[in-house]
Amino acid sequence: MVRPVQDEGGTQDKDSSMTLSRRTLLTGLGLTAGGVGLGLTHSTASAAADPTAGWTQTPFTFNVQKPHDLAVGDRYTHTADGEHHLWVYDTDKPHTPTSATDPRTEMRWHQEYTAGQHMWDGDVHLVAGTHGATFVQILRVQRPEGTPATDFMLNAYNEAGGTVKAYSGKVIKTGMYNKWFNVKIAHNATTGTVQVWFDNVLVHTDTDRGPATRHFKNGVYHHGTGRAESRFRNLTYWTR
């Protein structure tokens, strides 16, 4: 039995609800108005190494979750060239007054799913010193009682020049601070498979935590110390 579990992004700030509808090669057009966009099919004639071959580019919307006592602009900016910058401090308050969770500044994607194949795709920049922060996750917003809150997390640690781990366990990459790299996370919610690519190279395969309703999040959900910051561009949602 699936028990509705309160989403950690349960409240939406009126001034922080935004839409990204298609991959924008002119990165300065990272936001679209009104949520209108085209769903584009990525041809299977693309290079075999392209993980998005055969997938359909799908519009998505999001709102920014941030410390509840601060304005969105205190912890999030969207630059003229299309970059999303999100930061938070370990001393910040949680995103709601009643939450007991760690501080965060995250883009909470509104598109929820229970089945099918869904992919988060974006370029990521981890600012040096970020330690113990989740920068992308699949959150299980409605799930059977007693099951985990997430299907998958990518975390950044201040080790070896910026180490990325699956949760706090397997090391996926080192030396990842202060440079741009592409991340793709594909979740087949029907079979329960999670696959992760860095710069179009498959680096990790995992399994989810069972049936649930879930959605993507990216930013900094801070379980560590000090200041955490991540940046994103070319964010794209793929389905098939």
Image (cartoon, rainbow, N blue to C red):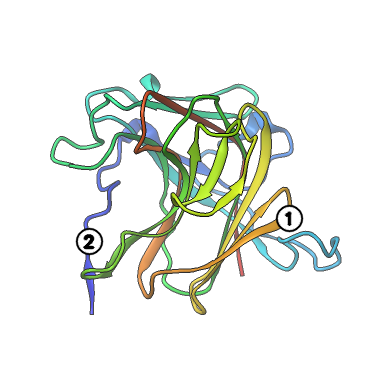
Q: At 67% from the left edge and 30% from the top edge, which residue is drawn?
A: 179
User: Residue 34: in sight, yes or no?
Assistant: no
State the image coordinates of residue 209 (x, y, percent, origin top left): 39, 70
Identify whether 176 is placed above or below 212: above
State the image coordinates of residue 51 (x, y, percent, origin top left): 72, 61
Q: CA distance from mark 1 to mark 2?
A: 35 Å
For the C terminus, the quadrant is bottom right
Q: At 30% from the left edge and 35% from the top edge, which residue is drawn?
A: 13
Quarter of the view holding residue 119: bottom right
For the N terminus, the quadrant is bottom left
In the picture of the structure, the residue carrying the numbered disc 2 is 5
The reply to whether the C-beta atoms of the residues labelled 1 and 2 are less than 8 Å apart is no
State the image coordinates of residue 217 (x, y, percent, origin top left): 44, 48
Mark 1: few, some, or many residues within 10 Å (few <14, many ≥20)? some
In the picture of the structure, the residue carrying the numbered disc 1 is 201
State the image coordinates of residue 45 (x, y, percent, origin top left): 86, 66
Identify whether 177 is placed above or below 23: above
The extreme left residue here reads: 98
Report the amino acid beneath label 1. Val
Question: SS at mark 2?
Answer: loop
Mark 2: few, some, or many residues within 10 Å (few <14, many ≥20)? some
Q: At 27% from the left edge and 38% from the top edge, which residue is drawn?
A: 102
Give 232 or 23, whichever is nearer the viewer.
Answer: 232
Q: At 64% from the left edge and 33% from the top edge, which residue is drawn?
A: 29
